[in-house]
């Protein structure tokens, strides 16, 4: 879906880069030619009164040719600008054609974030936690003040800001000292921080300093870090252009360590990234299904489950299937825990109670000999 947009976007970016590379020099050269000819014909004219001096035929021809070249130069620039504008315009058209701005009516009980104060508070809190979890404490504090958020977790913003700024500036020692003092059990994060410092030394071409640092500071206390430790040693002793160790120099590695450090410093974690990823995967399928089943939306989009299969890396919602009726639990038919500890659905519980021969509505667990009363069953929440 995004390929047509990326095609015209890449074309526009390439054209803009060409304009930035080529045209400033050409315009500067043309301006210098105009200035040079003006000085030669007008400013440095041999006549005593330059204002009343007349150009020679040769001077007029030279000036007309130069003006004609200048006009042609700017005509060419205008044509290239129109081509860039055409590519950018096509991007907008492709976005409108391939993406849907109306996502209403594709899920059950769609929430109104803008008008519902409860949902707005939840979304603001979700964004607030995310900003803190990536170390953007100043932005998070600004959001808290502007939205009037209540009962938020207390965070030492000065400490988080100082350590995160040092990390982003390439000074990893404050983060290493803080983690080693306050969370010595976070051995993997400590290893990653040490690794960032070692890679910085290697980038500066100082292998001896990197080896000395490993000997003095990096103690392998956690065997789970033995393979990364060996990999790091290989990067130290190998030439800098070995492709195998290029992964340690990727910006994504530095960013991942930064986020892990920020989460530990702030003590917060947000599922916003997972929610957005799940929405990106789910919404296109739901929009297509909404278009195909427009006449049956009351049956498709208001069930207790999504009408499409969504593949998720992390399952954040548990489900329960009744072992007796073989159906999944719902809000109207939740899982119920019997006194013996076995769990069945409420519908199954009611059927067992109806079949009971005892007046006290006692029932026998279908999985063990224990008997209990239906009123003793407790609802289970996942």
Image: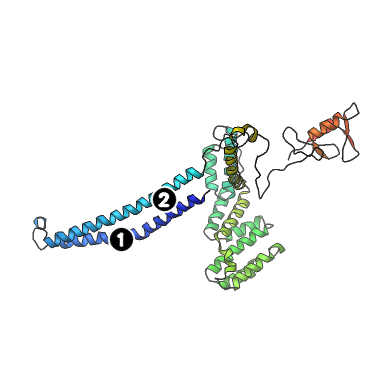
What element does badge 1 sit on?
helix
Q: Who comes first in sequence, dot 2 or dot 1?
A: 1
- Drawn side of residue 330 relative to residue 167, left or right: right
Which mark, by number, is residue 89?
none
Q: Nearer the viewer, mark 2 or mark 1?
A: 2
Q: Nearer the viewer, residue 310 or 243?
A: 310
Residue 87 badge: 2
Q: Quadrant of residue 212?
A: bottom right
Decide if residue 367 is on the left or right side of residue 60. right
Between 277 and 138, the residue placed more toward the observer is 277
Task: Residue 351: tell me if it is visible.
Answer: yes
In whole angstroms, how far apart are the C-alphas of marks 2 and 1? 24 Å
The secondary structure type at the circle numbered 2 is: helix
Give the percent coordinates (x, y) of residue 355: 87, 30
25 over 320 or under it: above or below: below
Left or right for 220, reference 35: right
Residue at x 70%, y 62% (from the top left corner): 224
Q: Could you tell me residue 50's position as x and y percent?
A: 11, 58
- Furthest toward the top, the residue is 359
Q: Residues within 10 Å of mark 2 (few under 14, many from 20)?
A: many
Q: Position of residue 174 (x, y in %)?
A: 58, 58
Q: Position of residue 83 (x, y in %)?
A: 37, 52
From this view, report whether residue 93 is shown above or below residue 183.
Answer: above
Quadrant assignment for the C terminus: top right
Q: Is residue 212 something one can see in this rendering?
A: no
Q: Quadrant of residue 252?
A: bottom right
Q: Say which mark, if any, is on residue 26.
A: 1
Give left or right: position of 90 versus 360. Answer: left
Q: Which residue is depicted at the point 54% across and 54% down?
A: 162
* Count of marks, rendered view: 2
- Taking depth in this image into account, of 218 and 15 the one nearest to the observer is 15
């Amino acid at each position: 879906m995004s390929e047509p947009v990326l095609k015209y976007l890449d074309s526009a970016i390439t054209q803009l880069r060409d304009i930035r590379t080529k045209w400033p020099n050409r315009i500067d050269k043309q301006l210098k030619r105009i200035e040079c000819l003006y000085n030669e014909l007008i400013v440095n004219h041999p006549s005593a009164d330059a204002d009343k001096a007349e150009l020679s035929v040769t001077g007029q021809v030279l000036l007309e040719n130069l003006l004609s070249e200048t006009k042609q130069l700017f005509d060419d620039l205008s044509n290239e600008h129109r081509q860039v504008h055409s590519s950018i315009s096509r991007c907008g058209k492709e976005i409108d054609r391939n993406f849907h701005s109306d996502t209403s009516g594709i899920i059950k009980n769609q929430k109104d974030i803008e008008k519902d104060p409860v949902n707005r508070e939840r979304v603001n809190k979700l964004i607030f936690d995310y900003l803190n979890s990536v170390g953007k404490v100043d932005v998070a504090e600004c959001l808290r003040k502007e939205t009037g958020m209540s009962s938020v977790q207390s965070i030492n913003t000065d400490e988080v800001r100082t350590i995160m700024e040092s990390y982003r500036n390439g000074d990893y020692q404050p983060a290493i000292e803080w983690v080693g003092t306050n969370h010595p059990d976070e051995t993997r994060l400590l290893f990653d921080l040490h690794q960032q410092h070692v890679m910085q030394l290697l980038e500066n071409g100082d292998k001896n300093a990197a080896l000395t640092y490993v000997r003095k500071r990096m103690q392998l206390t956690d065997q789970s870090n033995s393979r990364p430790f060996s990999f790091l040693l290989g990067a130290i002793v190998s030439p800098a252009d070995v492709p195998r160790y290029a992964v340690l120099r990727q910006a994504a590695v530095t960013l991942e360590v930064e986020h892990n450090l920020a989460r530990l410093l702030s003590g917060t974690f947000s599922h916003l990234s997972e929610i957005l990823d799940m929405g990106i995967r789910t919404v296109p399928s739901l929009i297509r299904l909404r278009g195909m089943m427009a006449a049956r939306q009351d049956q498709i989009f208001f069930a207790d489950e999504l009408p499409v299969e969504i593949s998720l890396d992390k399952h954040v919602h548990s489900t329960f299937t009744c072992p007796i009726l073989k159906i999944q639990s719902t809000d109207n038919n939740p899982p119920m825990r019997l006194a013996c500890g076995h769990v069945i659905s409420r519908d199954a519980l009611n059927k067992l109670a109806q079949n009971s021969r005892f007046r006290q509505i006692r029932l026998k667990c279908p999985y063990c000999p224990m008997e209990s009363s239906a009123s003793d069953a407790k609802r289970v929440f996942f």
